Image (cartoon, rainbow, N blue to C red):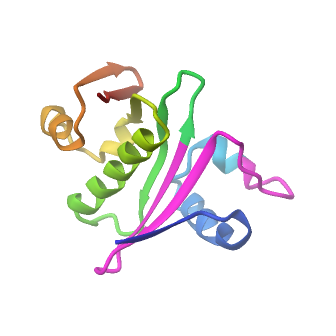
Amino acid sequence: MIYYQFDPETDLELLKSIDQKGKLPDTISSSLLEKQFDMKDNEEAFVFSNDEEDTGFLWLNISKKQMLEITCLFMNDHFASEKFQNKLIDFAVKRANYLQLRRVAFNNEVLNGRTELSQMKEELGCIRMEWKNPWIECILE
């Protein structure tokens, strides 16, 4: 799998296409209407691709609670493999570790219908999972 950091100057069309599919959170979508799209200092976004032509997009937000929030996880193909989705979430966990954050939060939409949190907890290396509506928090070691 390859990935690169999202660049608003060159990748704005990708963001607009995700928005047209109704998959961007309102906070990001409304920013597209401004003359110049700017990311905040606490935001990061990455574009992913694997050998099977799956494309993924991950928007991360470092909250004031010293937590990495997965604000948007988008896969171009709705039927992209669960394995590909897991790689994107795993990337977010590794990014949190790199940034020395101890929590990763995501909402139900990121889970894409998955309900087995105990398996996910093990896969991500969380010491525990906490439900704080609308967020699910993975507490890291």
User: Which of the 4 quarters of the picture holds residue 85?
Assistant: bottom left
Looking at the image, residue 131 sits to the left or right of residue 30; the answer is: left
Q: Is residue 42 magenta?
A: yes
Looking at the image, residue 113 sits to the left or right of residue 23; the answer is: left
> Magenta residues?
31-60
* Percent x, y of residue 126: 24, 32
Which quadrant holds the C terminus? top left
* Percent x, y of residue 32: 73, 55
Query: Going by the picture, which residue comes out furthest to the right?
Result: 35
Picture residue at 33% right of the left edge, 64% below the top: 78
Picture residue at 39% right of the left edge, 21% below the top: 133
Number of numbered tags placed on the structure image: 0
Which quadrant holds the N terminus? bottom left
* Percent x, y of residue 106: 40, 36
User: Which of the 4 quarters of the picture holds residue 52?
Assistant: bottom left
Picture residue at 28% right of the left edge, 62% below the top: 84
* Position of 24 relative to 81 (above/below): above
The one nearer the camera, 83 or 22, is 83
* Position of 118 relative to 133 (above/below): below
* Percent x, y of residue 10: 69, 73
Picture residue at 71% right of the left edge, 49% below the top: 39
Looking at the image, residue 79 sits to the left or right of residue 133; the answer is: left
* Position of 1 relative to 117 (above/below): below
The one nearer the camera, 47 or 98, is 98
